[in-house]
Amino acid sequence: AAPGTGPRPRLTVIGTGYLGATHAVCMAELGFEVLAVDVDHSKIERLSAGEIPFFEPDLADLLRANLRTGRLRFTTSFEEIAEFGDVHFVCVGTPQRADGYGADLSHLHAAIERLAPLLTRPCLVVGKSTVPAGTAAGLARTIAQLAPANRPVAGETAPGAAGADGLGRVEVGHDGLGHDEVDEPAADISSDLAGVQLAWNPEFLREGFAVADTLRPDRLVFGVASPAAEGALRAAFAPVIAQGVPVIVTDYATAELVKTAANSFLATKISFINAMAEVCEAVDADVLTLAEALSHDVRIGGNFLRPGVGFGGGCLPKDIRAFQARADELGVGAALRFLREIDEINNRRRDRVVDLVTAALDGTLVGRRLVVLGAAFKPNSDDVRDSPALAVAGLLAETGAGVTVVDPVATHNARQALPGLAYSDSVEAVVEGADALVLLTEWRQFADLDPARLGAVVRRKVVVDARHALDADQWRQAGWVYLAPGRPTGV
Ligand code: NAD
């Protein structure tokens, strides 16, 4: 059948964090039946009750709407997932290893090793997590060894031959879950797939825009080992492809590399302009004007050319480190040596903000009261993983300042990550008597702050705008000392 016209495959999602919860909700929104699993039972309870365990605009409404239709369900049972799904999306975390730069693939291996032995009929397992090149090939071997659907069983001759009913489905023992395999329409895919296959489909969503990015991504990348796997992926993304989203079909390793290469390029662009900020500081030039002038060159463009306090979050920093570690293993470490520099430029920006605050407060922070604006690694997110804002807040506290961090949604996560600081979700509530404000996450509401009103209650009118989010003239006119990295003090 043409994409979008055949019966729809039933989808599962394994791992319901930022990526998995978003993917599950959006695929249900696109009309698929979706069942999602996580080893974290409390997450599954909250999602089942219509609550998103993190902050992401628009996602909670879509979750509740799709729970109501019955298209979206959550479970803690891998058995249920295995029985239900034609296409299984694996969305578990791949954080940085505790002992080095490499990616910790233990969650991924655990998920595959738990799922594969339960897969008794042809289906497609799709990795979405960000992984080092070569990971998918290894996991495909694991699946081949562990999935019963890939082993000839008594009376059958070939892997996948279990689809003798002509539907490609195996009759599995009924378990009271209410699924009647015989009455179900066959999904397009299972008649084509011999056994259980693996595909890699890296994810490019941005936190803060996750719903829009999932419903209409810039592109889809399918790393596959067979035309049948490509067909199954096309069926699983039929409503997305029908919108004209480009599809790149390739091998596992190229698909894996697209993701790490994209993140490396973005990190490089950010560190490039932050390196220019360092040079601007040395000659009293203005990095904002420089960036604007560069952005008009169509070969360069303005996206990701915003100087500030650098990149962070659960992806860019760990992904460029894992990429270097993998390149070293592959004997091509020299090709990615520049990524170490990208990381170092990024980290120096954090120290630079501390220096600016210190210089503005007569060379010492001991005993100063500082209000830090922002904890999340970027606005419209409550994610504080490797957040530059929280890292700078911690550095400021280490120098002896009393630090209160204000963030509209991320204080809960921030308090868990850095319990030693004070937190608030309101600037007005904590600004009295402050020696300086330090803006580190460019939330819209911070740009709207009234410098005249705040100026009346602080002890010293000093503001360090590490994200270039405030109107410098407005703050200076209200009597504030306004400082921003990469900009001359008088600009
Ligand atoms: P996360 O930590 O928010 O979520 C991971 C989830 O997997 C958690 O809920 C965890 O309980 C669950 N999990 C762990 N082991 C499991 C297992 N064996 N079985 C089932 N569930 C298990 O992480 P995330 O931010 O969603 O990232 C997931 C992956 O997606 C990573 O590889 C990341 O690099 C990639 N990614 C993330 C984003 C993003 O913006 N967050 C974007 C693109 C790609």
Image: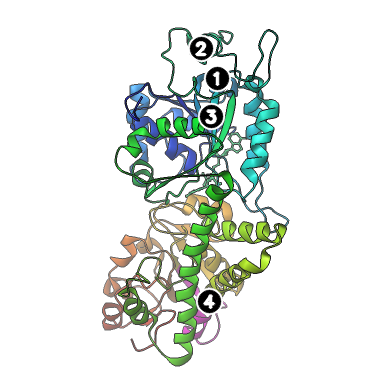
Q: Amino acid at mark 1?
A: Glu
- Counting from the top left corner in percent of width and height, residue 210 is at 39, 46
Q: Residues within 10 Å of mark 3 (few under 14, many from 20)?
A: many
Foreground disc of the pair 2, 3: 3
Q: Quadrant of the N terminus?
A: top left
SS state under label 1: helix
Q: Could you give the CA–CA distance between mark 3 and mark 4, rounded to whole angstroms? A: 50 Å
Q: Which mark is residue 80?
A: 1
Up-down relation of residue 379 to residue 57 (above or below): below
Q: Could you give the CA–CA distance between mark 4 and mark 2, rounded to whole angstroms? A: 58 Å
SS state under label 3: strand
Can residue 418 be seen here?
no
- Dots 2, 1 in contact, CB < 8 A: yes
Please tell me which of labels 4 and 1 falls first in the chain: 1
Foreground disc of the pair 4, 1: 1
SS state under label 4: helix
Please tell me which of labels 1 and 3 falls first in the chain: 1
Please tell me which of labels 2 and 1 falls first in the chain: 1
Verify whether residue 364 appears in magenta: yes
Q: Which mark is residue 124?
A: 3
- Dots 3, 4 in contact, CB < 8 A: no
- Dots 2, 3 in contact, CB < 8 A: no
Up-down relation of residue 365 to residue 40 (above or below): below
